[in-house]
Amino acid sequence: MRLIIVGAGKIGATLVEKLSKENHDIVIVDKDAKIVEQIVNRYDVMGVCGGGADRMILEEAMVENADFVIACTSRDELNILCCMLAKKMGAAHTIARVRDPEYFMEMEYMKGELDLDMWFNPELRTAQEIAEILSFPSAINVETFADGAAVMVEVKIKKDNPMIGKSVMDINREFKLKALFSAVIRDNKVYIPRGDFIVLEGDVIHLTASERGITDFSKKTQTFRRRARSVFIVGGGKIAYYLAKELIARKVIVKIIEKDEARCEWLSEELPEATILHGDGTDHEVLDEEGIDKCNAVVTLTGMDEENVIVSLYALRKKVAKVITKVDRSTIGQMVSHLGLDSVLSPRTIIASSVVRFVREIASEGKARINQLYKIHDKVEALEFPVTASFGYKGIPLKELNIKKNYLVNGIVRDREFIIPTGDTVFMEGDKVLVVTTEKNVNDLEYIIR
């Protein structure tokens, strides 16, 4: 497919990185010639220097042949205008980045009026993911499937964990877990574990279960932490605003510290239920004075990765039960993984999975064959597929299906119930099937069967 990505900032560059691995023809458009040159030299893509709302620039990018135009500049209005113009010039599908909370309230209506196929808000999506992690504090990361009926959590195996040295089969037998081992990351290698796989200290395991099953797992393996009821947020930007709104709706006590006085005033008006503090969140004396050690969780959301890392390390030193760190630069994200930080999130990585999933859906003739896509690792994905009326293997036990190598049926959701599949389990119309695979560009459930 031919994709035009307008805007070579953090989101745009990440989309180029992820989508170029899926063998698409990509054109990057940006006014900064130096950045365009850097991306063109790094990836096998074309580059056009100019504005995305300029007809001549879009003509140079051959927009009339584009399957997708993805507008992700820093300006919402420019992204919307770019998509409108691209559609009128012949682009098949358009995706716009829209961040402003004022636009957010009207986007579902505006999407149809503006003929947008998809819109995304990295800050909102990041806030939603943080809120999910705070619901399962024992997890590093959390991803929901089947409208929340299934949950995949990422957990690091620390010293004295009772699973260390035991096989997956023995763990399931001893703890009677109603969960599936989906993947294990060890020394940056990924394994889809079989029953004889031995769990070691330092492993990062991905488990899939219902919400109740995850809670049961954490209690039995002595990793259970209660949901955060008081959260201290450092930095009062858009993510902080969206996160506070979500947490307040869940009856969580929220405190935000922000050093920009005008921003504090705005937050105070928009979030009357939260405590808004005007101060420097990187000053340890200020943090101590405001009681950072008395909160259940700390979330660092300033605009500087280094500040977020330092404040998070300080929160851990103060023995805060749960610490979540926002890091935008992938290089820093890789470095801090060795510092003992709990949960580290990147907005651009989070949003890239949503866009990749949507592009794959259209690539498979728009038949909505992928409900969800989650990148466990660069080489492993978790996918959710619907079982439709046209699916050719309904009613056949899994033990009679020839499932391809490198695919794991990771769970089935039927009528909101999470089912751990066995050899006798069958697919039924309406099921939502979770699959973990090391294969690339998987678009359809039937692909997993020989």
Image (cartoon, rainbow, N blue to C red):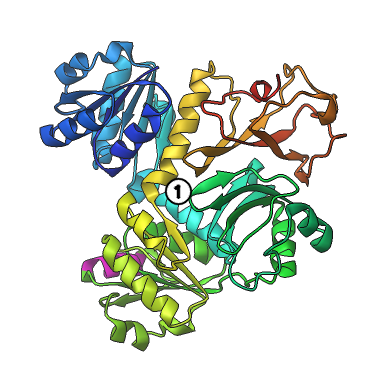
Residue 299 colored in magenta in the image: no
| Closer to the camera in the image, 440 or 374 | 440
Q: Percent position (x, y) of residue 139?
A: 57, 61
Q: Percent position (x, y) of residue 345?
A: 42, 55
Q: Percent position (x, y) of residue 214?
A: 69, 58
**Number of other residues with Cα within 10 Å of mark 1, as a class: few under 14, some 14 to 19, many 20 or more:** some
Residue 190, by quadrant, is top right
The kind of residue tagged 1 is: Arg
Q: Which residues are magenta?
A: 262-269
What secondary structure is the stretch in magenta mostly built from? helix
Q: Residue furthest left?
A: 33
Evaluate whether residue 10 shows in this view. Answer: yes
Q: Residue at x 58, y 29 (%)?
A: 370
- Left or right: 40 in relation to 342: left
Q: Percent position (x, y) of residue 243?
A: 44, 60
Q: Which residue is mark 1?
A: 125
| Closer to the camera in the image, 396 or 189 | 189
Q: Residue at x 58, y 20 (%)?
A: 367
